[in-house]
Each structure stands twice: as C-alpha cells, then as structure tokens.
C-alpha cells in the first residue's frame, strides 16, 4: 500500500513521506531499545547493592526522554505531511480532472469523484497523520524487542520470534478475506446512497400516487443489502481478530513457562526473566492493536486504489507542435466512433462551411449530441478525422480549440454564485460594458431587473434559484460574451414555456449571427433557420440537404417533420 501511496503522491510529496516513515521507524527502534535498559536496572535492584541501579535508572530515563522527543517530532511530522499532502492532493486531483476528456464524465463517475474528493481523500491522506505511526510502531517495536531478548537470552528470543510468522500469516489471511467484503460493502453503500437520493427526488411522484405512507421498496432492499454486507464484513474480520489475540496470549504464556524453566535451572537470573516478561508484555500491546490499525489501513487502501485509478487515467494527448486553425470550417472525414460497445458513428462525413448553419436531426439515440461532443473534442474518434479550419482537432491545443467554440447545452449548470460571475465565465477579463451588452442581447437584463439583488443576486447551486428559461438566458449571455467564431447548440428550447422560448430564440439568433453553427434540433421548427440539414439514423447520415429540398424528396426527414409538426397543426 505504501508503494501505491507514494505513486499517487508523486515525487513532490513522496520524498516527505519517505522521511516521515524513516523518522517513525527510528522512533520505534529507540522505543524497543530503551526497554533493554530495564535488564541492568532490575538486576541491580534485585542484587546486593540496589544503589548501583541509580546510573541505569538515569540512563533509562534519558532513553525514554529521547524516545518522547522523537515520538513528538515524528507524530508532528506525520500530521504536517498529512495536511500538506491533503492540500496538495486536492490541487493535483483537480488539475488532473480538468485535463481529462469531458466525455470521461458520466453520472456514475461524477458521484464517485464527489465521494472521493470529500471522504475519500480525507481517509487516504489520513494515513500519514493518524495510521502510519501506530502501524510502524506495531511492526518495528516488537521486532526490536525480540532482538533485545535474543541479545540477553537466545532461547527466549527465538521462542518469541516464532510467533512473528504466525502473526504475519494471520494479518495476510485477514486482509485477503476482507478485500472482497470491503469491495462489496463499498458497492452496497454507493447503491444505498443513490437510492436515498432517488427516494427524495421521487417524493412528488410518490405523493401524487397516494403512496406517502408506503415504504420505498428499492431503498429498503438496498439498506438490507448494506446490513448483510456489514454482517459479512464482521464475520470476515472476526476469525483474524480472535486468532491474533490467541496467538499473542499463547506466545506470552509460552515465554512465561520457558522463562520459569530456565530460571529454575539456573540458566538465567530472576531479574532477566522478569525484565523479558515485562518487555514481552509491552510487545503484546502493539501486536493486538494491529487488528484495528489493519481495518483502518484497508479502508484507506481502497480509497487510495480508487484515487490511483483516476490519476492513472490518461487525458487526451496534447499536440507536441500545436497548429492554429486559419479559418472556422468544420468537417467530419470518414469518422467512426464507438461509445463502449455501441457503434455511434460508422464512416460519417460532412462539412460546414465557415459562417453557415448546420442542423442535425434524427431519432433519440442517433448520436446527435455525440456529434457536437466530437466537434469540441470531448472524445477522440476511433478512425477518421474531425477538422476545424482544415486542421485535425487533435493537432490543436485544448486551450486554443476551446477558445474557438461557444457551447450552449440543453441542461445548463450554473455555479452557486452571482449572475454576473456566472456570465463572466465566458470571458473573465471582459469590461462592464461588454457584460451588460451580452446580457441585453440575451434578454437577461429583463431577469436581472426583477431579481431583488440584481446583478449580485445569487443563483443557488446549479442555478436552482432561477427557472429553466432564466438559466438558459445566463448561458446564452455567457456564450455571447465569449464571442467565439464557432457555436455548438444542443437544442436549448425544448423544455421552455412560450415566453422564455421567444426570448431565448432571440438571444440564439444574435449568438449565431455571422458564426459557424452546428445545432442539434429536437423541435423541428428550429431547423428552418439552418442552411443545411443532416438526418442521422443508425450511425449514418441518411439524408442531407436544405430543409425545403428534403421535404420535397418525401424521405425519412419528411416523415420525421410531418410527425413532429402534427401536434402543432392540430392545435
């Protein structure tokens, strides 16, 4: 686990961790060696001249003082390293997540990273601050004590050493038996957390169905699974804990019997036997604590493994010699792309001349939103090429590519901050006049005027304090402020009321003016504003052309148009 932790930490923090481990090891050795001074102390106290024990008592006190100082320094070093690493790892994790392809993120990954960034990092980095010192002490101090025992009497020392492989075997067996149960418990906890959220989100549906008094069966099932997993975890760790306790107790009893036999035979003095039994008893305490420490380390190891897996995920490669696109024509050239086991695009080609608008239409699951994501290089294609201005997007640096593109999604996420700060994300260094102009163009100024705080009004987490239409206006104002030459639109009006839809359409028209645009259309009336239309189905382009031309052909697009517009006509 230590090797994995050092790999996760990277060279910047691994060196400090190694120094801390070395200091803790020295501290544990000094603790074990200090007990060696008990032999001459007790020998003199039980001898004919007890006063001769005074120098040995002073030496023992000095050794204990040195140990106390080392323990303080090593514990302080562990706390400092732990807190420094926690701070640094937050930055390292954040920087790595920012470089991962956006396509890597999904609902499951977002939840996993959320847990990792809160509880997981605290538990993983808590190893240095809280678990490492007692773990090193539990291993090194008993071994040092055994070495001291061998120095004074090899029979007793070897007898104590025999217990070491038994203890190691028990710990290894317990760790292996716990690995499966720990993984199962983690999965059950994650599932139960999801069910709790689902239960809360489902309250309107449950209440509308008159089921407020009923228990939520899916949640109950998941909680029962957590209970069963917890029971299996306890049953898995119990034999190891009992076995460790019995081994330590049997070993101490054997030492007691052997020491008494050697003392009665005159091989060793009573003072030596008493001292060895005292230090053997001291050796038992850290060994018995290995069960509790081991459980904490296993939990931390699971989090470190998950952290290592995320940090080992390769970001999309950056070009060694980035190329700047000279213009803003967009193109797919024989693009094939799989998402998991599903074929999304199979040898798809099209182009969008600079300044023109392309509408992408098709049934659900046709890959319309994925097309936008490939244009923005959220993923890399399997075969073929995606180009901007004639340049493969893989040869354009991420910073330059993102500067060329403004994206307006259907689902808008706003940060828990003010309206102005959310708009300024489009161009943080924009002056106040540009921000106000973008807001006016998106008709966001109408929203700001009726909010109590105006520009300083807080939008809440995810923009929860605004309506869907108001969030879209913020998103459009942000895109207008960015003033990028390429605009990607994932139909932004499909869930809006007529008033907000009209306002958003006006803002979208201003956003698209003079720019290269690719728009995913769910509402077919949006298509009429496009220069060309692509109809996607089954991973291929089924039809392509102008709106009126496709209607005259009477093909798949025409059928789709008639079905989509039928409710409107009936109204």
Image: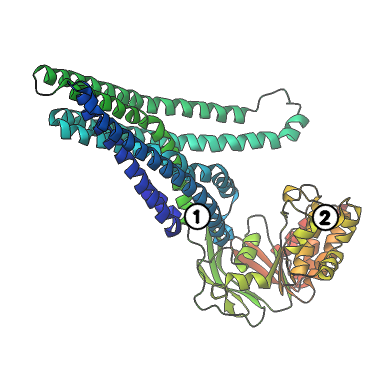
- The residue closer to the viewer here, 357 or 563, is 357
Crowd rating for badge 1 (residues with CA inside 10 Å; few <14, some 14–19, many 20+): few
Q: Residue drawn 68% across and 65% down?
A: 535
Direction bottom: furthest residue: 326
Return the x and y of residue 52 as percentages of the image width and height: 22, 28
Residue under numbered circle 1: 341
Q: Is residue 354 above or below residue 375?
A: below
- The residue closer to the viewer here, 532 or 211, is 211
Q: Is residue 133 above or below residue 354?
A: above
- The residue closer to the viewer here, 506 or 344, is 506
Return the x and y of residue 216 as percentages of the image width and height: 65, 28
The dot on residue 134 is none
Mark 2 vs 1: CB contact within 8 A:
no
Tell me if residue 376 can be seen.
Answer: yes
Locate the N terminus by quadrant: top left
Q: Is residue 284 left or right of residue 271?
A: right
Tell me if residue 493 can be seen.
Answer: no
Q: Residue drawn 72% across and 53% down?
A: 415
Q: Residue drawn 50% across and 41% down?
A: 123
Mark 1 lies on a secondary structure that is loop
- The residue closer to the viewer here, 209 or 246, is 246
Q: Which of marks 2 and 1 is in front?
A: 2
Quadrant of the rendered structure where residue 104 is? bottom right
Mark 2 lies on a secondary structure that is helix
Crowd rating for badge 2 (residues with CA inside 10 Å; few <14, some 14–19, many 20+): some
Q: Along the polypeptide, which appears first: circle 2 or circle 1?
A: 1
Q: In this view, does 347 lie above or below 354?
A: above
Cα–Cα span, label 2 and label 1: 47 Å
Q: Residue drawn 28% across and 35% down?
A: 59
Residue under numbered circle 2: 456
Quadrant of the rendered structure where residue 47 is? top left
């Amino acid at each position: 686990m230590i090797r994995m932790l050092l790999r996760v930490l990277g060279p910047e923090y691994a060196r400090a961790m190694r120094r801390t481990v070395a200091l803790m090891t020295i501290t544990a050795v000094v603790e074990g060696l200090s007990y060696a001074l008990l032999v001459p102390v007790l020998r003199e106290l039980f001898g004919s001249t007890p006063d001769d024990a005074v120098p040995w008592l002073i030496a023992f006190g000095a050794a204990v003082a040195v140990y106390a100082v080392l323990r303080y320094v090593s514990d302080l070093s562990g706390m400092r390293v732990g807190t420094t690493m926690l701070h640094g790892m937050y930055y390292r994790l954040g920087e790595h997540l920012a470089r991962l392809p956006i396509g890597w993120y999904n609902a499951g990954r977002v939840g996993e990273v959320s847990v990792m960034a809160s509880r997981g990092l605290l538990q993983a980095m808590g190893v240095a601050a809280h678990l490492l010192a007692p773990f090193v002490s539990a291993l090194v101090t008993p071994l040092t004590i055994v070495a001291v025992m061998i120095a004074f009497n090899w029979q007793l020392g070897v007898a104590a050493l025999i217990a070491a492989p038994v203890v190691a075997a028990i710990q290894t067996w317990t760790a292996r038996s716990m690995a499966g149960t720990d993984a199962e418990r983690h999965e059950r906890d994650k599932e139960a957390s999801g069910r709790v959220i689902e239960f809360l989100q489902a309250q309107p549906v449950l209440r509308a169905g008159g089921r407020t008094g009923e228990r939520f069966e899916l949640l109950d099932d998941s909680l029962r699974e957590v209970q069963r997993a917890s029971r299996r975890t306890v049953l898995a760790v119990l034999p190891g804990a009992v076995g460790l306790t019995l081994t330590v107790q049997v070993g101490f009893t054997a030492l007691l019997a052997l020491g008494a036999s050697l003392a009665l035979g005159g091989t060793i003095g009573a003072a030596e036997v008493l001292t060895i039994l005292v230090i053997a008893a001291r050796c038992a305490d850290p060994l018995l604590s290995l069960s509790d420490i081991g459980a904490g380390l296993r939990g931390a190891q699971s989090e470190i493994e998950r952290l290592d897996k995320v940090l080992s995920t390769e970001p999309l490669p950056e070009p060694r010699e980035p190329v700047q696109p000279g213009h803003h024509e967009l193109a797919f050239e024989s693009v094939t792309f799989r998402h998991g086991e599903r074929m999304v695009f199979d040898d798809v080609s099209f182009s969008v001349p600079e300044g023109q608008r392309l509408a992408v239409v098709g049934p659900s699951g046709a890959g319309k939103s994925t097309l936008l994501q490939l244009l923005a290089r959220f993923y890399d294609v399997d075969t073929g090429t995606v180009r901007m201005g004639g340049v493969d997007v893989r040869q354009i640096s991420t910073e330059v590519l993102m500067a060329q593109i403004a994206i307006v999604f259907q689902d808008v996420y706003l940060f828990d901050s003010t309206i102005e700060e959310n708009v300024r994300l489009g161009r943080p260094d924009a002056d106040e006049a540009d921000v106000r102009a973008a807001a006016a163009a998106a008709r966001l100024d109408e929203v700001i005027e009726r909010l109590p705080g105006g520009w300083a009004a807080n939008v809440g987490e995810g923009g929860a304090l605004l309506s869907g239409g108001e969030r879209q206006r913020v998103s459009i104002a942000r895109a207008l402020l960015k003033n990028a030459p390429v605009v990607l639109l994932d139909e932004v009006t499909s869930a809006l009321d007529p008033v907000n839809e009209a306002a958003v359409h006006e803002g979208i028209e201003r956003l698209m003016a003079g720019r290269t645009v690719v728009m995913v259309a769910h509402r077919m009336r949006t298509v009429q504003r496009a220069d060309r239309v692509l109809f996607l189905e089954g991973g291929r382009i089924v039809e392509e052309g102008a709106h009126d031309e496709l209607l005259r052909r009477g093909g798949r697009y025409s059928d789709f148009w008639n079905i989509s517009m039928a409710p409107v006509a009936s109204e």
